[in-house]
Each structure stands twice: as structure tokens, then as C-alpha cells.
Amino acid sequence: MPDPDPRAWSAQFLLMLESLRMGTTFSAGRRYARAGQVRSVTISTSIVTALVVDEDGETYRARIGVQAWTAADWARIDRVLAGNAIYAAKLLAGHLPDGLDQVLAGFGLSLFPQSLSEIVLDCSCPGWQKPCRHLTAACYVLAEEFDADPFAILRWRGRGRDEILDSLRAHRVSALGHIAARPATAHDRPAGRTTTGFWDAGPRLPRPQPPVPGAQRRSDAILDQLENLPLTAGRFDVTDLLRAAYHTVTDSEAGLPDRHDPRYRQRSAAHDDAPPSGPRGAATDPG
């Protein structure tokens, strides 16, 4: 078992334990861990359980307990993590953000126990000393688990990886939905940008001729002048697509029904088939 990288998550955990100055016990625990005498480690909310085989072949159960964070604690943590794009990206990529300790400190919490009073150590062996060599062996293997999967630290504190990521996604989707539902304001538009001239031809397109008095202006008229400038994308004629889009947008702005709606076409057909009205449509008396 290699010495822990001081930058690794496990280093904080082991430093607290080794500060107990129980050199002989920890030396024996490291030897057990390196020899593979820790047969299994199970991490669940608040409790880590390890099965450790002693030199005499007897298997003992070592348990390491901490206090899980409350639902209120997790709710505050979730909001901060979801609200910070860097934290969210790190978590979604399977890593714990480097600033997580500072976030937790703001809530009076910490990833790892800060003193022996914050941790419960128990072993089924007959020894009276706690931590015993079985417990210290379990701690070293647990530290390796934390470095291999940092989410195991949070699972120990009450939330598994899937729960954390699901909550993170839910918070971010909710935030995006809130932004999308917010009415646009003048502050949302870049300074100096208006819609004036949006429908005018650009510098590379032919300028439309002045309108003939009494003629009806069509939103897609500019497209009629593109016969020598075909616009295609693969097998699609972009001009036709633009024509439909121009009609839809301008009709919507004018409060008119969408002329591509089948109901509109039905109404238009009915109108065309109706007898003319007014003076020109007046019936004449054959007699």
C-alpha cells in the first residue's frame, strides 16, 4: 500500500487518525492493509464495516461511524453546488470540486471527522485499545476507497452518487426553466440592438424596387429576386423554407392566423368559393 498523496482526499482522514500518536497500532494496521488482511469494506450512511483477518486466522468486524448530514444540510449543499457552474461540471464528470471543503465550512460541516470525538470506532476483537490494529487496517483501506471513488465520502455522509447527481440535474433544470419562463426585458437585449431593418435586404442581396402605389407588400418578396442566387442545403431548397418562415413570423406579428395551418387553408378555400359581395356581386334581375 503506497503512502497517501498529501493532496489526495484520504490524506485529511489519515492525518486526523495519525494525530492520535499511536505509532505501534498504526504500524500494525498498515501492515495488515498491505498484506490484504482486510477482506471487505462496506460503506453506507454513517457506518463503514470492514472484515479483517487477524494473524491467528480469526476474522473480526471493525466499524467506523460518523454522523450523517441532515436533509436540511443536504438541501443547502445542493443549492450551492447546482448554482456554481464549475462545481456542477466537476460533479457531473465524476469528481469532487476542490472548493468543496470551503463550501461545507460555511455551513459548519466538514468532509472528514476533525477529531476523535466526531468518530465512533468499534471492533469485535477482545482487545481493549481503540483503535486497534483491525480498525487502523480498515481505515487505511477505507482511505484507498476514498481516493478511488471520492463519492464514497459523501455516501458515508448520507448521499450516494446517483442521489447527488439526480438532485444536481433537477436543480439546474429548474433554474433553466425559471429563466426561460421569465418575460424578456430591455436589459436582455444588447445595447443598441433593435429589430428595425431586420427584414431589409443585406448588402449582398439585390435591393427591392420602390413599391408601386396601391400594391400589397409581401414579407417574402425579397426571395423572388433570388432566382440567380439559389440557396440549397443538401436536397433542401432553403428559399422555400425561408418563404414559409417569413410568412409565419410576419403573420404572427400582425396577429393573423398561420397561413400554413390546415384550418387557415380550409377557411381560405371556403372564402374563395363564396359568391362575391358588394356592388360588383349584386344579383341582376333577369326580367
Image (tube, rainbow, N blue to C red):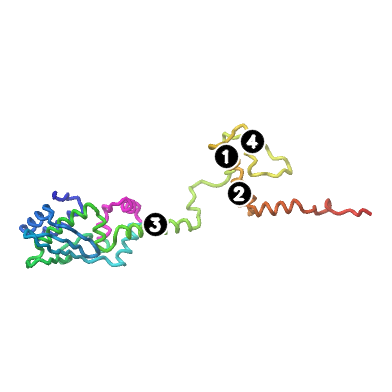
Residue type, label 4 = Gln
- The residue lying at 33 percent from left, 52 percent from top is 92
- Which percent across, then down, holds residue 272? 74, 51
- Which percent across, then down, holds residue 172? 39, 57
Q: Main secondary structure of the magenta part?
A: helix
Secondary structure, mark 1, is: helix
Instruction: Give the spatial CA distance, label 1 vs label 3.
Output: 36 Å
Comes first in the chain, label 1 or label 3: 3
Comes first in the chain, label 4 or label 1: 4
- Which residue carries the number 3 mark? 172
Comes first in the chain, label 3 or label 4: 3
Camera-side mark, 2 or 1? 1
- How many numbered circles are shown? 4
Comes first in the chain, label 4 or label 2: 4
Instruction: Give the spatial CA distance, label 2 vs label 3.
Output: 33 Å
Position of 11 relative to 221 (above/below) = below
Secondary structure, mark 3, is: helix
Q: Residues within 10 Å of mark 2 (few under 14, many from 20)?
A: some
Camera-side mark, 1 or 3? 1
Q: Which region of the structure is painted magenta?
A: 83-105
- The residue lying at 85 percent from left, 54 percent from top is 282
Camera-side mark, 4 or 1? 1
Comes first in the chain, label 2 or label 1: 1
Instruction: Give the spatial CA distance, label 3 vs label 4.
Output: 47 Å
From the viewer's perspective, tell me whether residue 277 is left or right of residue 111.
right
From the viewer's perspective, tell me whether residue 144 is left or right of residue 126.
right
Residue type, label 1 = Val
Residue 84: in magenta span: yes
